[in-house]
Amino acid sequence: MKTFDKISLGLFPTPLYKLENMSKELGTNVWIKRDDLCGVALGGNKVRKLEYLLADAKKQGYDLVMTTGQAQSNHAMLTAACARKVGLDCILVLKKRGVTARKGNLILNHLMGIEVRFVDTDSYDDIYAEMDRIGEQLHRRVYKIPCGGSNALGALGYVDCMEEIAQSGVHFDTVVCACGSGGTAAGVIYGAKKFLPDTRVVCSAVDSDPFDKIVYDIMNDINALLDEHTEIPMPELLNMVGAGYSIPSFEGNAAIELMLRREGIVLDTCYTGKAFAGLIRMAKEGQFKKDDNVLFIHTGGAGGLFAQDWESGNAR
Ligand SMILES: *Cc1c(COP(=O)(O)O)cnc(C)c1O
């Protein structure tokens, strides 16, 4: 098995513990892995991916990274924060989608002094071409990080996370996490195969992309990258997208309220609220036994929550 360099960016291992009130509420043992508490900016899953991606950028001698996402992208904000931390320049080329006003994560990008360029397109080919154009204008080489940091190298961060979870010694019957661009799901499912082979992984899809194929392909790429032959299962996905990506859903907001009221933990409207709503739905359907240990991976996202217009009733 090949190994890859990592730059230390976050505070790992992140806390893992049982949610007593939520367990009573849902009639099973609910645990949480707090990747929202990983210590960079507002925390979140992108930090584990960036430990690999920024190490690769540095190793290859780049001093400028660019990435993309929607206006409120947690991934973009965390890429900027992590790049700053290790002395890399960062330019964000964001889609003009979602809340483009200086709210939520865009406040943090502004305070970090990060240049944000908006592009009015949904085509990643166009976006990466724009990054190349900016690089040419600046006469600088650009290390391009894909949307969500979701390639095989980034996904290794979540293979590591599963090893970390296995080291807790707790047997988990089921692990639930959000799926937005697929890298986290790929790492979690691949890592479960290796380190928690008896654990079922369910990923709450918060976008309507064909994640069966996307996640499966990233797992195949992980095998190729590591020169391994881990058996790759078809991802088990739950459709939690509601009216659309980044549009708050009734079920997701109910999950946000429940988590905050019972446990004092902040979820977000775009990813973790909908992802945890998937866990609640499964509990209500009787998919967990009373003695099961069910683990929710909290992937962060607080910044986006504060970009929502709660007063107008758009969020709920
Ligand atoms: C990006 C993100 C996800 C989804 O992870 P992917 O690897 O893109 O599927 C989940 N939660 C939060 C808070 C995120 O920012």
Image (cartoon, grey):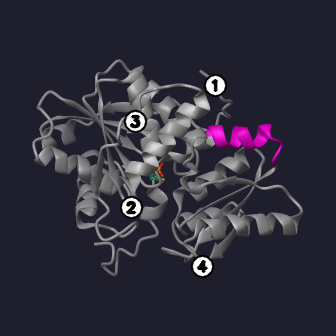
Name which residue type carries label 4: Asp
| Magenta highlight range | 51-62
Q: Nearer the viewer, residue 281 or 202?
A: 202
Earlier along the polypeptide chain: callout 1 or callout 2? 1
Q: Nearer the viewer, residue 115 or 6?
A: 6
Earlier along the polypeptide chain: callout 4 or callout 2? 4
Q: Position of residue 28 (x, y in %)?
A: 16, 35
> Which residue is found at the position 54% from the left and 25% from the top?
228
Name which residue type carries label 2: Asp
Magenta stretch, main secondary structure, is helix
The residue to which callout 2 is attached is 207
- Residue 39 appears in the picture as rendered: no
The residue to which callout 3 is attached is 189
For label 1, the crowd category at 10 Å Cα-Cα, with few meaning under 14, some 14 to 19 and many 20 or more, is: few
The residue to which callout 4 is attached is 120
Could you tell me how far apart the alpha carbons at marks 4 and 1 are, in whole angstroms?
Answer: 38 Å
Circle 4 SS class: loop
Q: Position of residue 103 (x, y in %)?
A: 53, 71
Query: In this image, 229 relative to 82: left or right?
Result: left
Circle 1 SS class: loop
Earlier along the polypeptide chain: callout 3 or callout 4? 4
For label 2, the crowd category at 10 Å Cα-Cα, with few meaning under 14, some 14 to 19 and many 20 or more, is: many
> Which residue is found at the position 60% from the left and 79% from the top?
120
Query: In this image, 78 relative to 179: left or right?
Result: right
Circle 2 SS class: loop
The residue to which callout 1 is attached is 3
- Residue 220 appears in the picture as rendered: yes
Earlier along the polypeptide chain: callout 3 or callout 2? 3
Labels 3 & 1 near each other (Cβ < 8 A): no
Q: Position of residue 82 (x, y in %)?
A: 66, 47
